[in-house]
Amino acid sequence: MLFALIAGSFVFWINGANPFEAYKEMFVGAFGDGYSLSETLVQTTPLLFTGLAVSLTLRTLLWNIGAEGQFFMGAMGATWAAQAFSNQPPWILIPLLMLSAVVAGALWGLPPAILKTRLQVNEILTTLLLNYVAIFYVNYLLYGPWKDPRYPGFPQTPRYPDAALLHQYFNTRLSMGIIIGVILAIVLYVLYKKTGWGYKIQVIGQSRKTATYAGIRVNRNIVRVLMISGAIAGLGGMLQISGLQHKLRLGGISNNYGYTGIIIAFLANGNPLAVIFVALFMGALLVGGDSLQMTMGFGKGVVHMFEGMVLFFVLAGEAFKRYKIQWIKK
Amino acid sequence: MKPYVKLQRITKRFPGVLALDNVDFDVLPGEIHALLGENGAGKTVLTNILSGRYQLDEGELSIKGNKVNALKWSARDALEQGIGMIYQDFMLVEEHTVLENIALADLSIPFFPDYEKIYNTITELGIKYQLEIDPNAKIWQLSVGEKQRVEIIKALMHETKVLIMDEPTAVLTPQESDDLFKIVKKLAMEGTSIIFISHKLPEVFSICDRITVLRKGKHIGTVNVTDTNEKELAKMMVGREVFLKTNKAEYTPGPPVIELIGISALSDRKTPALNKLSITVNQGEIFGLAGVSGNGQKELAEVITGLRPSTDGKMVINGKDISENTPRKAIREGVGHIPDDRIGMGVVPDLGMPKSMVLKNYREERFSFKGIFLKNEAIINYTKKLIEKFNIKTSGIESPVKLLSGGNLQKVIIAREISESPSALVAVHPTQGLDVGATEFVRDSLEKQRIDGAAILLISEDLEELLAVSDRIGVIYEGEIVDVSLTKDTNIEALGLLMTGGKIAAV
Ligand SMILES: Nc1ncnc2c1ncn2[C@@H]1O[C@H](COP(=O)(O)OP(=O)(O)OP(=O)(O)O)[C@@H](O)[C@H]1O
Ligand SMILES: [Mg+2]
């Protein structure tokens, strides 16, 4: 962590800025006033969902690299529901959107699960590949059947009907998504700690052999876990559109949330409560970084470099801690 | 003679346990030195300190009379001084071949190993010490005895001055043990010192020169083999007299519980392992299964417990046809299983003991509300009860079970499997690696289960144990049961002959 900050300073310094000032600027940018805090939370929301999605699979020692695609599919599913049931009142429409997103995300988790359990195909590969399929499919919809006829030049859908939108609080862009995310994290935590299901997937994650021996149906549970994980990411996708973007728009769906979610889950060591804080940290990094661009006049590249650097060192530090790499003197 | 290594006033603590308390220990060149003590006495920890795997807290270490910095003693130092160790739980990469594992272990080998040379060395050592092994086999395909050979070769690849063997014979058949003793004696004659950990006193007397006894982390004494006897040693280890006689109740078998009719199954390598095998185990009996390892015992145990599908034949348990068996069905029929692979299969290695204790029954009402919400408190109390009942030594119930000493880990599994009064029990080497006191306890527990009406299939390579506890003994050879007789009608010689494929008529 410390290394990460020092490395970050170095990036600022070679770009001719005072590192301390830059950090202060970032912090202020992310938490300084009501508005920036709300922006940080807005960024945290999707990360919370993808982080939770990946942390679930991590507990069973599976890698879901596909949260990105599942997030897209969730957004897609929600949009479909918003169009299909557009004259329903909010109290019916919103749950429908959620349901549709959850189903779409879960279905996106299904093929890797089947390939994994039936044919032992590595889930890392299949979930990753499905990301591209999801993104291409959404592209196709936006350039084709779902394009808003009023703006022929833009790959986007019309705005959702008002009944499909989540209320944004205190004149900010913050919706109830963050609250749902936090509740979900707590629910998952309780499930892990207190239920037979949590115990079961923990045993599967620790040793497949022991789980089989104990009469736990390993394959069936792997399928379930990958689908639930997809559903969580999908729900994140729905909240992103319904709570923030208000229409499906190319480039407006995910800011690599699925991939950042992997890092978050890893840093949180699969613990859903820790995911909340790590997601917040990442969210702050994103928002603080943006504010740096504005106040200190750094280019986008410098900020990205800084963010990359921080992540790299945090991850490396974590890996060191966890695997106790030893230097053997020769 | 000057000792090759000398450990003085060694103290080692783990959170919650004092594993070694002021222990002295030394090894003379070319001697075979036995290290004895109950489960959890500290034998493994002491040897691990010598091999540099653990760092000591206090104490001194000298090599060939020269003091070294004991606090900084590392695995690499140990290797450089020719100290090699064969661990109780093997250190092999299951997915890799024998050759790769051996190459991996050797620090002097460059980044791109010369596989051909290593291959040749393996073959050479194999001939010299009769350690035959296929260098290209994958580790997971090997039997336990074969894995051990790989470990020995690994150690012999270096110039070994002191070879530590942590319970090497626990997993071996009598025949394999004899082969091992020949190797050990040969090495000792060539000047290598051997530190030999075992719970089997007869073998200690037959091959060792000196004996050191530990109890609860303390050094009780070091004696010459010629100056002592089994009784005295058992007393030094346990602190009381031990009786390894089970008082068997009369043999009155009930109806069949486990019935296998013409069962066939494949091994991991997809070769036939069980060959139209038939066997019946009745209520209230202990059926001992003798055989040289690799003749289908493992597969048989797995078929009965649902871990391995059968390819042919019929299986009936409690009168129910479960030819299409699964672990779940077997558990539901009350089939307990004490597996061979303790850490890998019998427990959840990285979690605390409660998680391993309720593996099979956490769905029950007393541990969870409708199988959904766990009653964590009830689970912990249950675990504590079993710890007490089975006298399991642990530094804390939430510390990972893989840190338990070998014998205590086995007790966790046994406690779980027999506490639920199984209708049938498949016990694979249940007393392997247990000290005399614990062995006595396990045998008594099996006997108690038998009196309560369980059908017990006891798979063991220890013929004396089979003869001591079984009612009937069957012999498995190349996937078939070649003989079944009442225990009183058979003896070690006859069984030994049958196990290697001989015909009883020849006796
Ligand atoms: N890494 C560890 N962390 C914590 N406690 C440990 C660790 N290793 C061993 N212990 C504890 O130290 C004590 C001595 O264990 P050790 O493994 O040396 O016993 P042992 O004499 O080899 O027994 P066994 O015959 O059962 O193999 C035990 O109480 C054990 O639980
Ligand atoms: Mg030990």
Image (cartoon, rainbow, N blue to C red):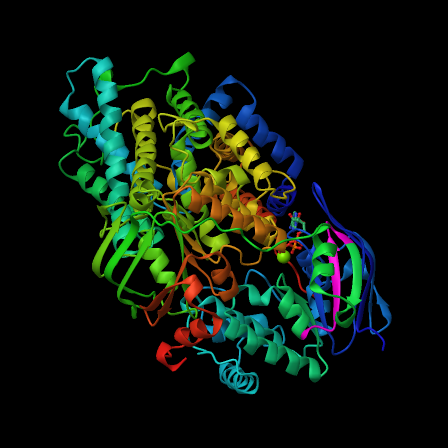
Residue A209 percent location from the top left of the image: 40, 52
Residue A248 in sight in this render: no
Q: Quadrant of the N terminus of chain A?
A: top right
Residue B123 lies left or right of residue B53; in this view the side is left
Residue positioned 51% across, 46% down in the render = B445
Measuring from the top left, give residue A305's x and y in whole percent. 52, 46
Q: Is residue A122 left or right of residue B435?
A: left
Query: Above or below — where is A111 with respect to A46?
Result: below
Q: Residue at x 48, y 56 (%)?
A: B469
Residue B8 point in image, percent of width and height: 84, 60
The answer, for residue B293, to whether it is visible in the render is yes
Q: Quadrant of ligand 2?
A: bottom right
- Taking the image as shown, residue A59 lies to the left or right of residue B410, namely left
Quarter of the figure with residue B287: bottom left
Residue B299: % across, % down: 35, 61
Nearest the viewer among B105 and A160 is B105
Q: Is residue B60 above or below residue A76?
A: below
* A64, A288: nearer the viewer: A64
Q: Quadrant of the C terminus of chain A?
A: bottom right
Of the pair A251 and A42, the residue shown nearer to us: A42
Residue B208 located within the stretch drawn in magenta: yes
Q: Quarter of the image holding residue B487?
A: bottom left
Quarter of the image where one finds residue B225: bottom right
Count of all numbered marks drawn on residues in the image: 0
Magenta span includes B408 = no
Magenta segment range? B207-218
